[in-house]
Image (cartoon, helix red, strand yellow):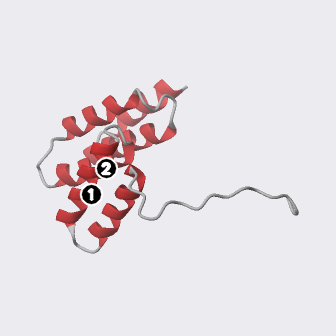
Amino acid sequence: MAGVHYPKTLPKKNQETSSNLNNRAISLLDFGQQKKAEELWQKALKIQPYHLESIYNYGLILWRAARLTDAELIERIEEARQFYPGKWLYRYLLASIHLERGEIDLIHVKICDNYY
């Protein structure tokens, strides 16, 4: 709406939220700095232990490096579920894990059927 004033607050400089740390970790990973990325994910999860995006991204890196099993990653995502009732992101991330596992049938059974 033109002419309507919306109050704005400036973000705090260098604010370290789990979301910000997760985004920075992904950027570092893109630049080949996996160790630094992992440190940021660990920090993000200390701030917010059930931050879905950090659990998923960090867990995926660990799983692909055989430092975490697929079952452990799914368990971590499931544990965080209670903090995100009805949130689509939880279902999407879980479906992505099942897809990478090659369990396409489970995507529908565990994700879609429980949604409707």
Query: At 35% across and 64% down in the image, what residue appears?
Result: 24
Query: At 27% across and 67% down in the image, what residue appears?
Result: 29
> Going by the picture, which residue comes out furthest to the right?
3
**Residue neighbourhood size for the residue with mark 2, other residues' Cα within 10 Å, grouped as few (<14), some (14–19), many (≥20):** many
| Quadrant of the frame with the N terminus | bottom right
- Residue 12 in view of the camera: yes
| Mark 1 element type | helix
Q: Which residue is mark 1?
A: 40
Residue 104: x and y in percent read: 35, 40
Residue 103: x and y in percent read: 30, 39
Residue 37: x and y in percent read: 25, 62
Q: Which residue is mark 2?
A: 44
Label 1–label 2 contact, CB within 8 A: yes
Query: At 32% across and 44% down in the image, what residue appears?
Result: 47
* Residue 10: quadrant of the picture: bottom right
| Mark 2 element type | helix
Question: Looking at the image, is 108 positioned above or below residue 66?
Answer: above
Q: Nearer the viewer, residue 55 or 7?
A: 7
Relative placement, left or right, of 111 versus 47 is right
Please, what is the three-letter code of the amino acid marked with disc 1? Leu
Relative placement, left or right, of 59 versus 66 is right
Question: Looking at the image, is 110 positioned above or below residue 62?
Answer: above
Please, what is the three-letter code of the amino acid marked with disc 2? Ala
Q: Give the distance between the C-alpha atoms of the residues marked 1 and 2, in whole angstroms.
A: 6 Å
Q: Which mark is residue 91?
A: none
Query: At 47% across and 24% down in the image, what residue appears?
Result: 114
- Residue 55 in view of the camera: no
Question: Looking at the image, is 11 positioned above or below residue 52?
Answer: below
Q: Nearer the viewer, residue 104 or 38?
A: 38
Residue 73: x and y in percent read: 24, 39
